Image: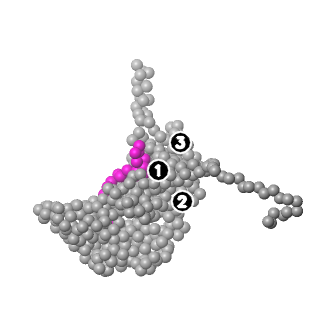
Amino acid sequence: MKNIIFCLILTFSHPLFAQDVFRGGTIYTGTGELIENGFLSLNSKGEISQVDTDSAKNKTNPSYDFRGKFITPGFIDAGTVLGLSEIWAVSDTNHGGAGDLDRDKDFNQSGYLAAEGFNPNAMAIALSRTGGITSAIIHPSGRLISGQSAWVDLESTKMFNAKVIDPSVAIHVSLNSKSARSVGGSVAGIVLLLKEAFDDTKYLSQNDKELDRTRGKKSSLSRQDVLALKKALDKKIPIVFSVSRAVDILTAIELSKTYGFQLIVSGGEEAWMVADELAAAKVPVMLNPYANLPSNFDKLGTRVDNVVLLHNAKVDVMLSTFDGHNVRNLRFAAGNAIRAGLPYQAALSAITTTPAKYFGAKNVGSLETGKAGNFVVWTGDPFEPSSFVEAMFINGKKVSLDNRQEALFRKYRTFKRRGTVPAKRIKLQDGDNGDK
């Protein structure tokens, strides 16, 4: 009887689920903590059950020995068109916007969901994993209010290379000279239309009968537009403003204060000029650290240390490739920001914890107990070009790193030439030097 009781005590003093244990390397938690000779374990739900130093108390046999390796949270690119556009010149493969829906005023497409145009088997998805990308936010484009972005995990299934986790994480607005041309050429015209849209949303969302009358009718605001904008005005999702000029950034801040939504600045080439105002309003900025020269008149104040100046002013920053085919290069963008003067841990947070925070993903972005097991094992420093991904885990499951480029490399690396014709040899006569 004593032996039975002793066995029961041993059984219930250890986890009843299978564990994956990683030990021996360097762990960047994403919270600013660096753990040398670290220990990380996952439970059967794919959640992180422990992150600690590899001390004597951790006696569990490792499933993975990663001595000399680095572990980071999975990287998040918050400004992509991944899976929305495959070949720029082929319209049939581009689904990033709702297009012309034949409305009287087609500037507002808030109800459009980019998730519904997403192709989870786009070739660039598997390739993006090789850059440590475990999640991406895919955003719509076109019109003044282009629609809603989605959170996508690059977790492979039997049928697909990714899956949509949340189809509505933000609404996207363009406040720049390019979009102004569609409403008469003035940025002030955009502001007027935005104010009307926000005012109408408040009115219609409080008057169900009036809202019902928009069903099946041409209107600047459809029922779906109102419902989407209401989420933003209720602070359930942020509104991302694609904006470059400092003066337009201040306009966006004023709109956010007036209508009470969480603002995110995207692009923000001149954001450094109004860094104090952004910090005071607690507005994060998503930018491309490669931007160092103006490409149009909206971006005359572009400078390569924009991200550093914003960070020094206590503005939360996110980094993005703003791409669909080269999302895997996000780590190089972070490395470039570090070269410009951004602290290492701040660069890591800019592609992990900060986008997770502002786009409502509470269970990813950092390596902490209870969070999803989304992390990457690297051969070396992830921001060094010579390092590469050795293993990737999403929700605790090991994800394949195979992709089309790798498959083509394997196929043609030892490809034997076929059908070659040997060169005809000409027999030279005595005294002939072969010039004839």
Q: Position of residue 271 (x, y in %)?
A: 41, 74
Mark 1: give few (<14), some (14-19) or many (20+) Cα within 10 Å. many
Which amino acid is tagged 3?
Answer: Tyr
Quarter where residue 15 is shown = top left
Q: Position of residue 8 (x, y in %)?
A: 40, 27
Q: CA distance from mark 1 to mark 3?
A: 14 Å
Q: Which span of residues is magenta-colored?
A: 153-173
Q: CA distance from mark 3 to mark 2?
A: 23 Å
Question: Is residue 164 rendered magenta in the image?
Answer: yes
Identity of the residue drawn at 32% across and 80% down: 185
* 416 to 235, vertically: above or below: above
Identity of the residue drawn at 59% across and 51% down: 412
Residue position marked by numbered label 2 in the rendering: 383
Residue position marked by numbered label 1 in the rendering: 375
Q: Earlier in the sequence, mark 3 or mark 2?
A: 3
Q: CA distance from mark 1 to mark 2?
A: 15 Å
Q: In terms of depth relative to the viewer, which is nearer, 127 or 339?
A: 127
Residue position marked by numbered label 3 in the rendering: 64
Q: Quadrant of the N terminus?
A: top left
